[in-house]
Image (tube, rainbow, N blue to C red):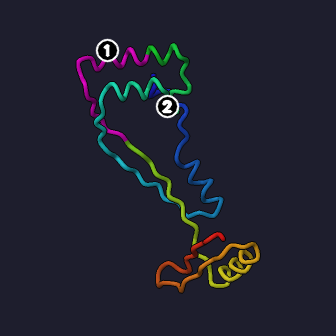
Amino acid sequence: AARQVWRENQPAADIYVKAMEAAGFCTEVVQHDYTVTIKKAAWLSMVRARFWSTFSHFTQEELDAGVAELEAQFQGQEELTFDDRLLFLVGTKPSLTPEQAGDLRSAFLRDGVRATVPQPNSHQGWPIRWRIR
């Protein structure tokens, strides 16, 4: 049941990508597959504590029934191993032109923020580092 609830309530990554791009970010979705090995008691404790937001959609009775189902499914196992997947949405702002950097630096200096604008490197344009004083 939890997988079905997750599918029904998990927005597609594309929704976030579009929102980030609308805000001016260049975006990339990075998928990371990995194997999890965890003590069964620790995993069930995380489920009971609603560690994943998926479980916020369950009543206490549904959660208890799910935990009982998992305990029966993995009876006799002290440790569980399964594959998991994470999606990382990476957003970067395009580099500023020297003119934009200068305008931004002037505006922030008026407000007590020091901007360090290093010389551009050949591939990345004008990176800016901020230091608030």
Q: In the figure, residue 43 lies in which quadrant?
A: top left
Magenta span includes 5: no
Write the residue at 32% across / 45% down.
Answer: 34
What is the x, y in percent for residue 7? 49, 32
Disc number for residue 72: 1
Disc number for residue 6: 2
Residue at the extreme left: 76
Q: In the figure, residue 77 lies in which quadrant?
A: top left
Q: Secondary structure at mark 1?
A: helix
| Precedes in sequence: disc 2 or disc 1 | 2
Which of pointers 2 and 1 indicates the residue nearer the eye? 1
Rendered view: 56 above or below 16: above
| Magenta span of residues | 66-84
Kind of residue indicated by mark 1: Ala
Q: Quadrant of the C terminus?
A: bottom right
Q: In the figure, residue 101 lies in which quadrant?
A: bottom right
Taking the image as shown, residue 52 lies to the left or right of residue 97, namely: left
Write the residue at 45% across / 22% down.
Answer: 1
What is the x, y in percent for residue 62? 50, 16
What is the x, y in percent for residue 108? 71, 74
Q: How many marks?
A: 2
Write the residue at 25% across / 24% down.
Answer: 78
Magenta span includes 68: yes
Q: CA distance from mark 2 to mark 1?
A: 22 Å
Looking at the picture, tell me which residue is in the foreground, 89 or 13: 89
Q: Label 2: few (<14), some or many (≥20) within 10 Å?
A: some
